[in-house]
Amino acid sequence: MSLCLMEGNEAIARAAIAAGCRFFAGYPITPATTIYQHMLDLLPPMGGICLQGEDEIASLGFCLGAAMAGMKVMTATSGPGISLCSEQISFAIGSEVPVVIVDVQRLGPSTGSATRGADGDIQFLRWGNSGGLPVIVLAPVDVRDCFTLTVQAFNLAEQYRCPVFLAANKEIAMTRETLDMDALVLPEPAERRLCPPDRDCPPFEPADDPPVPYFLPMGGERIVRHTSSTHGPDGYITADPRTIARTLSRLRRKLASVGDRFSFFEWDPCENTEILLIAYGVTARAARAALAQLRSQGRKISLLVLKTLYPVPADLIKKCLAGARQVLVLEMNLGQYVREIERLAGGVPVRHFGRMDGELITAQQVIEAIAA
């Protein structure tokens, strides 16, 4: 048995290496800085690259350039930094550049409280790009999740050629826990599909399922085009409405239609459920503790812990909603993901309990919210 004591940020860094990441660029910001520090220790000895940009915008730009050359890349920041990255995020979506972006959330808005956690960036991660096209957002609960979901994030970024966010949280990222490395079940590292040498591959012409183009690295022997402007399969700027519609429809479809393939979650059901709890991130830990206490008293409570937030796992949520008399959504903000549950709930009443004052939601508060 290989037991390691590590914080969530270290688990993310080590998992990135295990997934094949060989390029990291970032800018120091609490509480994400230790990811940068760990990557600085880990990457250079194995021939990788770790560097600091002059800001978060440049850092993500460095990552996109390295990804275009064929490298697996990652950056890490927090709320004020992620808010600067919107244009680069949009570029990654439009030009189909794979990148893993870790957002170690802290209390906002703006500079907020650098040493207090929150989950206030959840809607921004989904909608913080011009055009509103889908992205993938994964949410770890603990150090184990920080490791396993980081590996999944790299695989998804490579497979779907898109930005993948890890919506961490200060409390998860900077809490040390014991992790049994030998007990981890990790997927094999995925690689983006390269254009066969005997084929002409237009840069944005989709291959088969999933509808993602073959990849050609910048700087290779074959000419490659990347553009942030509206384009067709050939990569050239276009104003043709039909071509634009087909391209944007494909960018939406390549994620929105296959979200069930990477819906990570924990489901703890109970027959004749009186209340279904839905939580994500560090708040799921309080929900688990409350669930155990209430069940010991004979209460019929079910718990759904979401680890894929976007694309919204609609089929999963609807299945878990079936038979529940009411739903209580728990999150460390004033009400963001609850909107997704409300639109899927049909006639099932949905309540929300949120907290955004720099303190964690406790199991006792969950129990009180259920009784309210």
Image (spheres, rainbow, N blue to C red):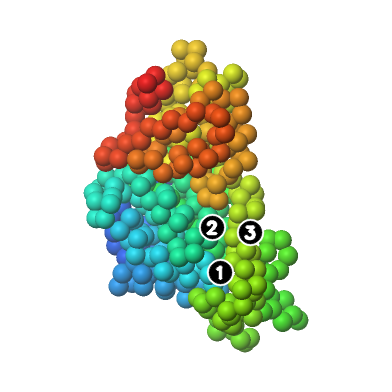
- Quadrant of residue 160 within the rendered picture: bottom right
| Kind of residue at disc 3 | Arg
What distance separates the C-alpha of mark 1 from that of mark 3?
Answer: 13 Å
Q: Is residue 248 left or right of residue 339?
A: right
Counting from the top left corner in percent of width and height, residue 322 is at: 61, 29
Residue 92 located left or right of residue 256: left
Q: Residues within 10 Å of mark 1 (few under 14, many from 20)?
A: many
**What is the CA distance from the residue labelled 2 to the residue labelled 1?**
12 Å
Mark 3 or mark 2, earlier in chain: 2
Q: Secondary structure at mark 3?
A: helix
Q: Name which quarter of the figure residue 248 lies in.
A: bottom right
Q: Position of residue 311 (x, y in %)?
A: 55, 51
Give yes or no for contact between labels 2 and 1 (Cβ–Cβ under 8 Å).
Answer: no
The residue located at (58%, 44%) in the rendering is: 313
* Mark linked to residue 26: none
Residue that appears at 38% across and 51% down: 121
Instruction: Reply above or below: 229 against 185.
Output: below
Residue contact between numbered discs 3 and 2, judged by CB atoms under 8 Å: no
Reading the image, the residue beneath label 3 is 253
275 left or right of 224 in image:
left
Q: Amino acid at mark 2?
A: Pro
**180 or 198: nearer the eye?**
198
Residue 96 - label: 1
**Residue at mark 3 to residue at mark 2: CA–CA distance:** 9 Å
- Residue 350 % position (x, y): 47, 31
**Residue 17 at x, y percent in the picture:** 49, 60
**Is residue 108 placed above or below 292 in the rendered structure?**
below
Question: Do the numbered discs 1 and 3 sit on residues whose CB atoms are within 8 Å?
Answer: no
Q: Residue at x 50, y 37 (%)?
A: 342
The residue labelled by disc 2 is 134
Decide which of 146, 310 is in the foreground and name it: 310
